[in-house]
Image (cartoon, grey):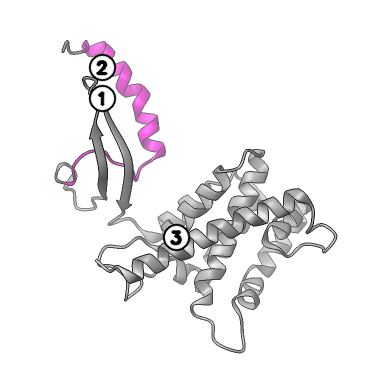
Amino acid sequence: MKQPSIPAAQARNASLNPIALMTPQRYASLVSQRNTPKARMATLADVTPKARQGVTTIERIAEITIGTDPQLLIRRAVNLVSAGPLRDFLASVMAERDVNRVLTVLREDGPRLQRLPIERLRAAAQSGANATMLSPRIRETLYAAILISGIRLLLGQTVKHPYSSGDVIRSVVRDALRRLDAADEVQGQFLRNCLGWGNEDEMNEELVLDLRYCVGVAIEDLAESMALARRHPG
């Protein structure tokens, strides 16, 4: 097959580099080719060559990140939201000591190679938010609601009677939610609705019901993936 000219190859690489920078944890090369001190390893499954020359389809990717600062992973999750009051809200909540701990500590009964809770939670929130065909502002609010609900799930594993995970998460987000209300009251109320904390007369609106359903499905998937990891240690 004819090799592309040097100018053509440079132009192609220039167009691919921004894409690679936007997805720094995805790799299609072998681990042995990325054997650096802080390598990130990706296990590729179901790589099926097609009959057409030079075409390979990667159908599934299971990724394990090694050597990345957990606080950087938290900042990446927060920065998926546009700069503004909602991002500030998430940054404030995730900086809370107990929240930060449950997001960055690996389970002792988990597999030998496991994803940090923040990675699992970020992936669940992204999938849930991107599954809708709504406006970017609503998708970001849905993303934030899934993150908060996931943090509630994680905190619930550390809560003892007579307290509940609901009591704990409301206490954790109270001050940050007040600041969000002061900066953007509409988005603050919409976030409350997505979390099921809104006014009773708004909770039965069709859009709110749909978004709460999306949050519920995302958290069910997150809980199932966490349970699966505990049942099948590496």
Q: Regarding mark 2 in the picture, which secondary structure is present there?
A: helix
Could you tell me which quadrant the C terminus lies in?
A: bottom left
Find residue 197 and report its image quarter.
Answer: bottom right
Query: Horizontal placement of 106 versus 37: left or right?
Result: right
Q: How many marks?
A: 3
Find residue 119 and report its image quarter.
Answer: bottom left
Structural distance between the alpha carbons of marks 1 and 2: 17 Å
Q: In x, y percent, where is residue 61?
A: 32, 45
Q: Regarding mark 1 in the picture, which secondary structure is present there?
A: loop
Can residue 206 be seen from the camera position used here?
yes
Query: Of callouts 1 and 2, which one flags the residue occurring earlier in the amino acid sequence?
Result: 2
**Amino acid on which disc 3 is placed:** Ile
Q: Is residue 4 above or below residue 167?
A: above
**Amino acid on which disc 2 is placed:** Ala
Q: Nearer the viewer, mark 1 or mark 2?
A: 1
Residue 188 lies in the magenta stretch: no
Kindly check if marks 1 and 3 are in contact, taking CB atoms under 8 A apart as contact. no
* Residue drawn at point x = 62 percent, y = 45 percent: 139
- The magenta stretch is 4-31
